[in-house]
Amino acid sequence: MTRVLSVASECAPLVKTGGLADVAGALPGALADLGDEMRTLLPGYRSVMGQVKKAKAVATFSDLFGGPARVMAAKLAGLDLLVLDAPHLYDRPGSPYLGENGHDWPDNPERFAALSYAAAHIALKGADKWKPQVIHGHDWQAGFIPEYLHEMSGGKGGVPFVFTIHNIAFHGNTGPDRIKALGLSDWRFNADHFEFWGHVSALKAGLTGADRITTVSKTYAEELMTPEFGMGMDGVLRARRDDLTGIVNGIDTEVWNPGTDPQIKVYKTAKGKGPNKTALRKEFGLKKSDGPLCVLISRLTYQKGIDLILEALPALLARGGQLALLGTGETALEVALLERAAAEPNVGVRIGYDEALSHRMIAAGDAILVPSRFEPCGLTQLYGLRYGTVPLVALTGGLADTVINASPAALAQGVATGVQFTPVTGEALANAFTRLCDLYAAPKTWAAIQKNAMKQPVGWETSAADYSALYAGLLEG
Ligand code: ADP
């Protein structure tokens, strides 16, 4: 049994902008089944504080990066939370990271340095008569933890730190003029610690200071060490190759269960998807059609390959296929998608973030699309597998690891679960749409793929055991 402090900038169901929240929300429960005890330190955003009713202060700071702060212990949604209540940093409208103008909060370096500082404080001094044996930090927002551990312990460190990369695109950079304000040591502003090409980088601090680094799939772990995917950190990661592992994300198989999902007309086998499909077509204003109904739920960004969908769509529509898409993100993509939906009767687009609708879409779809240029793990293809909604995915990162391409060999062996395409271009996606439509037009083959998909283990059991072993391994030496 290991006591672990998880440190995350978002955690489902309290606050979520992406997959990190799902992981942070699901891992504690999965670890508890294995006997580990995980508590989660989370920023007290306005929306989070609104949900925390019964809480007690377990640590206080008279001045945490510009104002007083407290750590509040609370039990919520089955989670043991430690919420960092720091109104000067978190009590504001908008998303966890962006103001209402859509730009990063200018004090984001301090906002998340505070989270890391509080984590180091709890690890060394304890909170609520509880001291973790391991700290597990997620993404750059937790990157300064080893720096603060080092500072506070007079160089001893003392509590092992596991650092998980969910998305290496975000570095948490700021200028060296902030070093003092962030409570960091000048002399560690070098390539071995938190300097990254003249900037202060929270991500680099985490990567250089962690005892173990993990990322959310084995393929992404390999990709991260290449210039194409490493976003400048590939050299740092190559240097730490022996400490880097990939542990694939699971999904919450209770929340995502087609047999019990309260948002849908439940079904046990993919044959039962019909009523959901009819209802969703109605909801999106789509008529009945012979081709596959494809769904896509995503942030609308370049990373997610949404522009490739626009490019390749004619190949799907030509075969009677349809698209129902839900997402928010870059304005240019939102506008282009809405224009396409207005022009094409077989395309429906909803701009927004809507958890319930995402369940209805995944239950209704014949296929789910994930054409990402890079994808550390990806979750929607896992929901697709669970719901018999065949994933059509780019051959990258976690998408490569979790889907078995319907190649002639995989079909012959009866193990295919989806369609993969590479390179990640509009042309290759168009070809993949054609392959998908061919498979869909062969009902027996299609039914076999759906059945295989639904049999895949997509829960947390295996991965939680991997994390548990990783924590335990750190305490042995
Ligand atoms: P990322 O973390 O890069 O955004 P993931 O696939 O790992 O991508 O996780 C995205 C999560 O957010 C999934 O749970 C997905 O269903 C959800 N999601 C993304 N966009 C929306 C949306 N517009 N409405 C509802 N859920 C969404």
Image (tube, rainbow, N blue to C red):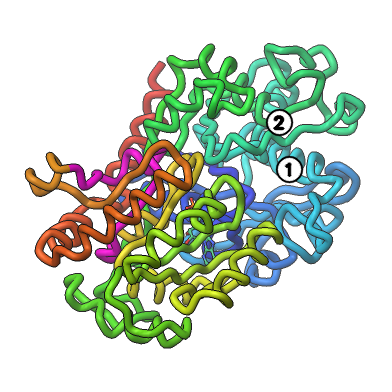
Question: What amino acid does circle 1 point to?
Answer: Phe
How crowded is the residue under tag 1: few (<14 C-alpha within 10 Å), some, or many (20+)?
Answer: many
How crowded is the residue under tag 2: few (<14 C-alpha within 10 Å), some, or many (20+)?
Answer: many
Q: Which mark is residue 112?
A: 1
Closest to the camera, between mark 2 and mark 1, is 2
Q: Up-down: is 425 above or below 430?
A: above
The residue carrying mark 2 is 202
Q: Please indicate whether residue 56 sits to the left or right of residue 349 in the image.
A: right
Question: What amino acid does circle 2 point to?
Answer: Ala
Q: Residue at x 57, y 69 (%)?
A: 340
The region drawn magenta spans: 386-407
Q: Up-down: is 181 above or below 317?
A: above
Q: Is mark 1 within 8 Å of ligand 1?
A: no
Q: Residue at x 37, y 24 (%)?
A: 473
Q: Nearer the viewer, residue 283 or 257?
A: 283
Q: Nearer the viewer, residue 275 or 185?
A: 275
Q: Nearer the viewer, residue 321 or 457?
A: 321
* Residue 12, horizontal then vertical, whole percent: 53, 60
* Residue 307, horizontal then vertical, whole percent: 56, 53
Residue 119 appears in the figure: yes
Q: Is mark 2 within 8 Å of ligand 1?
A: no
- Secondary structure type for disc 1: helix
* Residue 452, horizontal then vertical, whole percent: 16, 55
On-image quarter of the C terminus: top left
Q: Please indicate whether residue 380 sits to the left or right of residue 451 in the image.
A: right
Residue 471 location, quadrant: top left
Residue 100 among magenta residues: no
Residue 286 location, quadrant: bottom left
